């Protein structure tokens, strides 16, 4: 009889231990699933922010080479919302170019330094040759410009703001109207 009772108690203990182990495995699975969901959201946010940042950097490069940007007339050849300082991009491929909206501020001249004729390479560089004028200073100046860029992803809500500085060689005539220094 003792052996029979002892075996029944052991079977009961095995059942309890099995149920506890099943509960622990279920909890571990639930916690793992929640961690995976959280990590996926983090990765999605990082990707959206990275896409907005890359779009902003692309817009900066496009604006810098656009004629009229430093003069304050326009930043993009193709703009959106009839604002020459905003650009819309299509990232999803659905031919609706409002996935990311980029807005630039007008460039502000921070500082300008006239270029001396002695610093020019008149014979080796055509741009330097066009700056030359008789006297101590040339017709050109080195200017530091600053502007802000705001890129917003309308799909995910990710937003990036970048302050960019650009140094250019420009005409003294432009600097007279744009720079106060």
Image (tube, grey):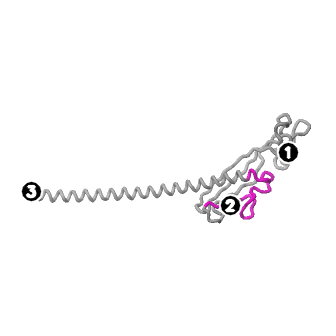
Task: List the residue tagged with mark 3.
Answer: 2
Quarter of the image that includes the C terminus: top right
Q: Earlier in the sequence, mark 2 or mark 3?
A: 3
Q: x%, y% of residue 65?
A: 75, 51
Q: Of discs 2 and 1, which sits in the foreground?
A: 2
Residue beneath disc 2? 88
Q: Closer to us: mark 2 or mark 3?
A: 2
Label 2 sits on a secondary structure element that is: strand
Secondary structure of the residue carrying tag 1 is: helix
Mark positioned earlier in the residue sequence (2 or 1): 2
Relative image position of residue 31 (x, y in whole percent): 40, 56
Q: Which residues are magenta?
A: 63-91
> x, y (%) of residue 158?
60, 58
The residue wearing badge 1 is: 172
> Main SS of the magenta segment?
loop
Cβ atoms under marks 2 and 3 closer than 8 Å: no
Q: Earlier in the sequence, mark 1 or mark 3?
A: 3
């Amino acid at each position: 009889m003792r052996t029979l009772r002892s075996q029944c108690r052991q079977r009961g203990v095995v059942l309890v231990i099995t149920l506890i182990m099943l509960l622990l495995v279920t909890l571990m699975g639930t916690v793992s699933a929640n961690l995976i969901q959280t990590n996926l959201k983090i990765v999605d946010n990082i990707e959206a922010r990275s896409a907005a940042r890359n779009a902003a950097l692309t817009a900066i490069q496009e604006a810098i080479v656009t004629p009229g940007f430093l003069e304050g007339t326009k930043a993009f050849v193709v703009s959106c919302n009839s604002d020459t300082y905003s650009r819309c991009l299509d990232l999803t491929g659905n031919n609706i170019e409002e996935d990311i909206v980029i807005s630039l501020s007008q460039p502000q001249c921070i500082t300008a330094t006239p270029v001396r004729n002695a610093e020019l390479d008149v014979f080796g560089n055509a741009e330097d040759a066009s700056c030359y004028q008789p006297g101590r200073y040339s017709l050109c100046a080195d200017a530091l410009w600053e502007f802000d860029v705001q890129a917003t992803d309308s799909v995910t809500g990710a937003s990036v703001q970048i302050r960019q500085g650009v140094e250019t060689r420009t005409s003294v005539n432009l600097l007279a109207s744009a720079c106060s220094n």
